[in-house]
Image (spheres, rainbow, N blue to C red):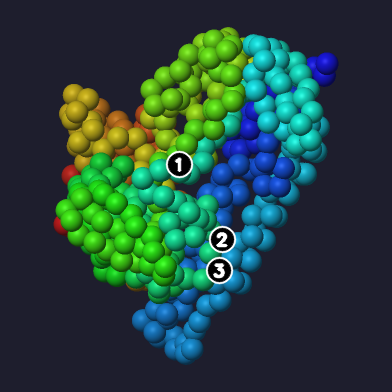
Amino acid sequence: MREYDVLVIGGGSGGCASAIRSTDLGKKVALIEYRKKDGIGGTCINRGCIPTKALLKSAEVYKTINEAKKFGVEVEGASFDMKKIVKKKDSIVNNMRFGLSSFILKSRGIEIINGKAALASKNTVEVTYENGEKEILKAESIVLATGSEPAMIPAFKIDGKQVITSDDCLCMTEVPESLLIIGAGAVGIEFGTVFSSFGSKVTLVEMVDHAAPLLKDEELCCQVEKYLTKKGIDLKLGVAIKEIKAEEGKVTSVLGNGEAVETEKVLVSIGRKLNTDGLNLEGVGIEMGERGRIKVDSHMRTSVENIYAVGDIVAGPQLSHKAQREGVVAGENICGMDTEMDLDTVPWVIFSQPEIASVGISKAEAEERGIEAIEGKLPFMANEKANTMQETTGMIKIIAEKESHKIIGGKIFGPEASLLIAELALAVKNGNTLEDIGDTIHAHPTLSEGVMEAAKSGLGKAFHPQKG
């Protein structure tokens, strides 16, 4: 029987981070991944973060060329080739997966085992290989990091051709004439951005009253909706999908209000299925939490002391960077350190054009928790750099405790929100105040000045008018 200090099940962001950190701290580690071709890197590299950003970059370049005239640049005859765009996306994904597997994991001596894993006991894992053979591996500690995949919702009759998931969408080499997207969260808005940029007539359906509902900020949600509508995306909010009927050449989506929408394709961007089937969790006594997720403490430890779980299969947002941090936390605790995970400091981003980003809690959420809060904000219209870029849509908001001025949240809709949110994530993590940011000199002219000005706004010291 082969023995290891740590066995990691799952080769995505959380699993790789756990394997890397445990190895760096002196442990002998093996990583088990059942996908042979496109497993290492998980959803993020292969079917999520990276391929979507590659498509979004192509869409951004095409958009910039088409808008060049407003900068005094004349460009004629701009076109795109979706086959080449997808080929470039695949090349980026393959390079990143190879780099992670060969240069980051194998160079550390982490053994990669291709097979389907199941817990045999609290210290052993049964691996079933492609040829049907089985092997029992032993370890002092085990990390579960099996992730999730798009849910195959029976009512929507997903066929991978006309009614598709995000995985299918990444491989489309032709732009559909029309596309209805179910769900106006990150996946829906990002794919809506891509395909509307390339000429699709996009309809975005969301059962709650706002697009980007996780913002939990009505003012910013309304700005997002206004921009999506201006971009030509047809928003249908506060309505569910009642039925989907696929016929030759078209799909008819019947909404809860009785309206029927005909499109060439339908993208189902709601629901993720946890990859926990067949792990034998109950067999070894692992306690489950809400919504089928594995219950863990702040050290990422399950109810079985030497077994840890990270990523999509535990509570919290299903985000690559959250999983990665949890993997580090698990690895450090396996090695005798005392490291805790804090979900309140996890930022998230929707890579639309412009971007949407958030960290911590909104003013409304603060009030729900009984926290008296104040809000500082700066519209990008008042930021000099945004004006030179001619990207003045949106605003920056900072939420702080009224008495102490301690920053508890940040919301951004606008250019480079994914970069700007980092300063606010650091502030939330470290308990910084509005004064800490407002009194820090930021370079001029930059978008980051907007963060400083938003902090000053919360203190009543802003230079710019604060009308959104």
Residue type at tag 1: Ala
Q: Residues within 10 Å of mark 2 (few under 14, many from 20)?
A: some
Label 2 belongs to which residue? Answer: 171
As drawn, the label of residue 151 is: 1
Residue drawn at point x = 21 percent, y = 41 percent: 375
Callout 1: helix, strand or loop? loop
Residue type at tag 2: Cys
Callout 2: helix, strand or loop? loop
Q: Is residue 413 visible?
A: no
Between the C-alphas of marks 2 and 3, the distance is 6 Å
Location of residue 338 by image quarter: top right
x and y percent of residue 223 in the render?
23, 57
Residue type at tag 3: Thr
Judge left or right: residue 160 versus residue 290.
right
Label 3 belongs to which residue? Answer: 173
Between the C-alphas of marks 1 and 3, the distance is 23 Å
Residue drawn at point x = 61 percent, y = 49 percent: 46
